[in-house]
Image (cartoon, helix red, strand yellow):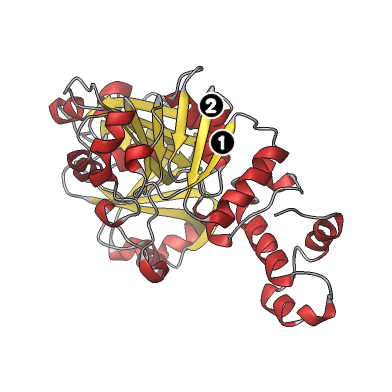
Amino acid sequence: MELTTSHIQFIKDHAADDLARLLLSAAKYPGMDIPFLADQIAARRQIREKLPSWYDNERLVFPAKIAAEQCSSEQTAAYKQELIGQDWTVCDLTGGLGIDSYYLSRKAKHLTYIERFPVYCEAAKHNFSVLEADNITVVNADTAQSADTLPEVDAFYIDPARRGESNKRVFALQDCEPDLPGLLPKLLKRSPRVIAKLSPMADIQMTLDLLPGTTSVHVLSVRNECKELLFVTEREADGEGPSIRCVNFGPDGIQSFFFTLEEERNAVLVPAGQVGAYLYEPNASVLKAGAFKQIAVRTGVKKLQVSSHLYTSDQLVPDFPGRRFRVDEVLPFTGKLCKGLSKTIPQANITVRNFPLSVEELRKRTKISDGGHPYLFATTLADGKKVLVRCSKA
């Protein structure tokens, strides 16, 4: 599997084409494997934003569009290097497109890439050669069927496929392939730790029950959208609850927040009596992890209401892990207010938190269009009052 100079030029020339039409006009391009090249164009469109360095490398090939859809982003793949040691041997049990294998190999002494589909293995061998990743061994095998003969390594990495028969999406961890909870005891016999990448939709507490020995959970978001959960499970776990790390890769840098589930359970929340000079909305990783009380305890802000997940302070907290706003006005939510609000706020970015109306319903009631610089938060205060908080970015 390799791209010729003419293939590369064809992909460039037709990068913006309608791919369905391109496939129908295959006869116009004798000697060209149009289905293969259409797949390359589709995959490259898929990775343009999340894998810019791979997108810029014209010689890389992609075995299937779905592989590009499901692979990690460069930020999250590079983050996984923090979970392994410099001289470790690592085995990626679900190689796929090879993004995670490649980034892990940049730190590991040696990495074994295992993948059950031969075409993926062929593409991986080619790509690793192009990328000069010469410490990776590619193995075509089914992890579930070869669990007893896997190499003994310092860490296994696994990303169970979240699609079953007929490409149908599955959600329960036991229904993914391979079945990680069933496979885990065998893996921990051959390695002291297993690093699992799971769906951002997975319930953290339920997953902890399925993966005993988990010592840390990493909740990764890119531009405030939760992308994946990483569970690190160890053979010699001490039995204490896992640490939780929330990470958001944003345009202005990385936001991180650490806590434990026990700390969250024991934290005492002091609700805000009123909206202060600043308003805060935690990033997607913090919200996914459920650090609703710890975020207030650690940063010194107060929560507007137990279910609102918005926070306030009189002094700016510049390192709050989320969005920070200056409060310009607090408006009591009434029918009379809605009727005339668009005259003073014709356009705004609206967010609802613990509020009886959706964003669409509120826009319909107020006739406020989307966009502009004002931010409008519709929420409920500790005394039960419904308010609209008009803000500007801090």
Front residue of 72/268: it is 72
Q: Say left or right for 367 vs 128.
A: left
Q: Say left or right for 284 vs 112.
A: left
Q: Position of residue 293 (x, y in %)?
A: 22, 32
Q: Pick whichever of labels 2 and 1 is earlier in the sequence.
A: 2
Measured along the vertical axis of the image, is residue 246 above or below residue 143?
Answer: above
Q: Residue furthest front?
A: 149
Inspect the image, locate mark 1, and give the three-letter code of the amino acid beneath it.
Thr
Front residue of 262/388: it is 262
Mark 2 and mark 1 residues within 8 Å of each other at the beta carbon? yes
Q: Position of residue 53 (x, y in %)?
A: 68, 41
Q: Position of residue 373 (x, y in %)?
A: 55, 48
Front residue of 284/111: it is 111
Identify the residue at horizontal 29%, vertical 50% (top origin): 179
Q: Say left or right for 183 vs 107.
A: left
Inspect the image, locate mark 2, and give the three-letter code of the amino acid beneath it.
His
- CA gap, disc 2 to disc 1? 8 Å
Tell me the SS state at disc 1.
strand
Q: Residues within 10 Å of mark 2 (few under 14, many from 20)?
A: many
Question: Which labelled disc corresponds to residue 110?
Answer: 2
Residue at image mark 1: 137
Measured along the vertical axis of the image, is residue 384 above or below residue 257?
Answer: below
Q: Name the quadrant containing residue 46.
A: bottom right
Q: Position of residue 26 (x, y in %)?
A: 77, 78
Q: Say left or right for 378 vs 15.
A: left
